[in-house]
Image (cartoon, grey):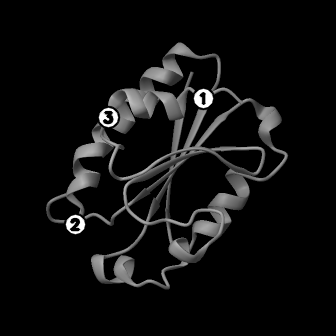
Amino acid sequence: MTVEKVDATVADFDAHFDKLFAAGDDAEGKVKLLLFLADRDASSNQTWCPDCNVAEPVIYDRVEAAAKGKEKDVVLLRAYVGDKPTWRDPAHPWRADPRFRLTGVPTLIRWENGAGAARLGDDEAHLADKVDAVVNASN
């Protein structure tokens, strides 16, 4: 099946989230994933976050593999947290939002029935078997 990747920033996140992850919309049969990441540097295509740079290729590989092996499409909403000073602010919207309560990036969340059903934090997001467990969690 396919993987649809959608990019969002803090400014446009709610519109993308509401469209792609609306509660009660699970009947579509899509696997819905949120991936919170550090912003990229345009000159290097790397992020300011070393953990993101290591985990991203692993996450994309495992998501693509899962989509090929399933009868379900995957929606991956990549949410970029901003530059380092923006992210470090304790009042960052995704740190404070009770739906996400982010403490680090990268963070991968499987979204089902209007809530996070499985979660992988920055300390394990680079481990293929852990990513597989989140991506392939049954609903």
Type of the residue with mark 1: Ala
**Which mark is drawn over residue 11?**
none
Q: Residues within 10 Å of mark 1 (few under 14, many from 20)?
A: few
Total number of numbered labels? Answer: 3
Residue pointed to by mark 1 = 137
Asked if the residue at tag 2 contacts the one at tag 1, i.e. Cβ–Cβ closer than 8 Å, the answer is no
Q: Which amino acid type is shown beneath numbered disc 2?
A: Trp
Quadrant location, the N terminus: top right
Residue drawn 35% across and 80% down? Answer: 88
On screen, residue 139 above or below 23:
above
Q: Quadrant of residue 82?
A: bottom left
Considering only order in the chain, which callout, 2 or 1, is on the residue closer to the N terminus? 2
Q: Determine whether, in the image, residue 55 is placed left or right of residue 114.
A: left
Q: Mark 3 vs mark 2: give the one in front.
A: 3
Q: Residues within 10 Å of mark 3 (few under 14, many from 20)?
A: some
Q: Position of residue 133 (x, y in %)?
A: 49, 29
Q: Which mark is residue 48?
A: 2
Give the residue at x 42% y 34%.
131
**Which of the two marks, 1 or 2, is nearer to us in this view?**
1
Q: Position of residue 105 (x, y in %)?
A: 37, 60
The residue tagged 3 is 127
* Mark 2 burial class by Cα count in 10 Å: few <14, some 14-19, many 20+: some
- The percent position of residue 16, horizontal first and vertical second, equals 63, 60
Between discs 3 and 2, the one toward the N terminus: 2
Cα distance between the residues tagged 3 and 2: 20 Å
Q: In this view of the protein, can residue 4 be seen by the observer?
A: yes
Q: Position of residue 33 (x, y in %)?
A: 56, 44
N-terminal-most mark, 1 or 3? 3
In this view of the protein, which residue sits in the foreground, 10 or 116?
A: 116
Measuring 49% from the left and 65% from the top, which residue is drawn there? 102
Q: Secondary structure at mark 1?
A: loop
Disc 3 is placed on an element classified as loop
